[in-house]
Image (cartoon, rainbow, N blue to C red):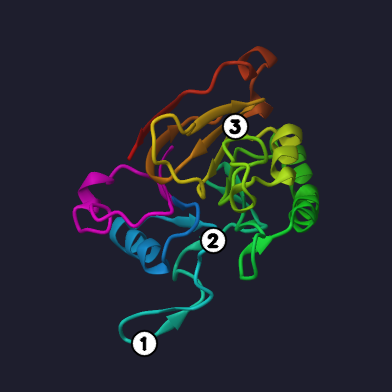
Amino acid sequence: MKMLSLSDQVLEFIYNPSVVERFADIDFVLGCGDLPYYYLEYLGDQLTKPVFYVRGNHAAEMEYSTEGAGRSEPWGAIDLHRRVVNHKGLLMAGFEGCVRYRQGPFMYTQGEVWRMVLAMTPALLLNMARYGRALDLLVSHAPPFGVQDKPDPAHQGFKALRWLLTVFKPRYHFHGHIHVYSKDTPVMTRFKDTLVINTYGYRETKIKVLDRSRQSKKTETVADKVTVKHG
């Protein structure tokens, strides 16, 4: 399965009709926050593929078009915030926003995100019973605490997401929020059983998720095969 993931930047070459040819082979689009709604709508319309997203801390509560029409979400896209979704066998869940560092929407305290994650636990346990695994892909705007985050309050990661990775072991965690301005900024980190990927700008990622309910214990230990192209 191949996906186009994006966050934090509107890229001219993507917001362009040539996107149809360039990304013709993707299976879905994943928005990891701080992207205008029209950008995700454009990709959904042009690529005719499903679009999943979470909001970033700079998301608009209401976005208006040049014609004056307003909307509080990208039309036609699926909001993953606090949801567990099965997309063609790929088990996904998501959390929007970042750590609260000022007043405004789509920002949360560590305690608030703990409550969100714990509220999701029954659905993840149900996945475990049904499919032999809780989650394949975690999507968030902010990173997990201590993994690719920053020490300042605005860019600190969520502790509850770190716990979720430790306990439920998704194979992948895609996030945004941490801007990449230099080559020494980590963008792909192995944390326990999860590959954490910062998708600032854009990434094309080809992933293969093993069905643990149908694999032997030996097969489960095989390293993930992941091919990534990014900007």
Secondary structure of the residue carrying tag 3 is: loop
Q: Which mark is residue 55?
A: 2
Distance from Cα at disc 2 to Cα at disc 1: 22 Å
The residue lying at 19 percent from left, 53 percent from top is: 18
Q: Secondary structure at mark 1?
A: loop
Q: Amino acid at mark 1?
A: Gly
Q: Position of residue 218 (x, y in %)?
A: 65, 12
Q: CA distance from mark 3 to mark 2?
A: 22 Å
User: Which comes sooner in the sequence, label 3 or label 1?
Assistant: 1
Q: How far apart are the two marked residues, 3 and 1, measured between alpha carbons? A: 42 Å
Relative horizontal placement of residue 150, taking residue 65 as reference (left or right): right
Disc on the earlier residue, 3 or 2: 2
Q: Image point 44% across, 71% down: which residue?
A: 75
Q: Amino acid at mark 2?
A: Arg
Residue located farthest toward the bottom when viewing the structure as drawn: 68
**Relative to residue 53, is residue 121 drawn left or right?**
right
Mark 3 vs mark 1: give the one in front: 1
| Residue 220 placement (x, y as % from top left) | 64, 19
Please tell me whether residue 76 is drawn above or below residue 216 in the rendered image.
Answer: below
Q: What secondary structure is found at the residue carrying circle 2?
A: loop
Circle 1 is placed at which residue position?
A: 68
| Res. 184 image quadrant | top left
The magenta span reads: 1-29
Residue 135 - label: none
Q: Is residue 210 left or right of residue 23?
A: right
| Amino acid type of the residue tagged 3 in the rendering | Arg
Q: Residues within 10 Å of mark 1 (few under 14, many from 20)?
A: few
The answer to whether the residues at label 3 and label 1 have Cβ atoms under 8 Å apart is: no
Residue contact between numbered discs 2 and 1, judged by CB atoms under 8 Å: no
Q: Residue at x 27, y 46 (%)?
A: 24
Q: Residue furthest top?
A: 218
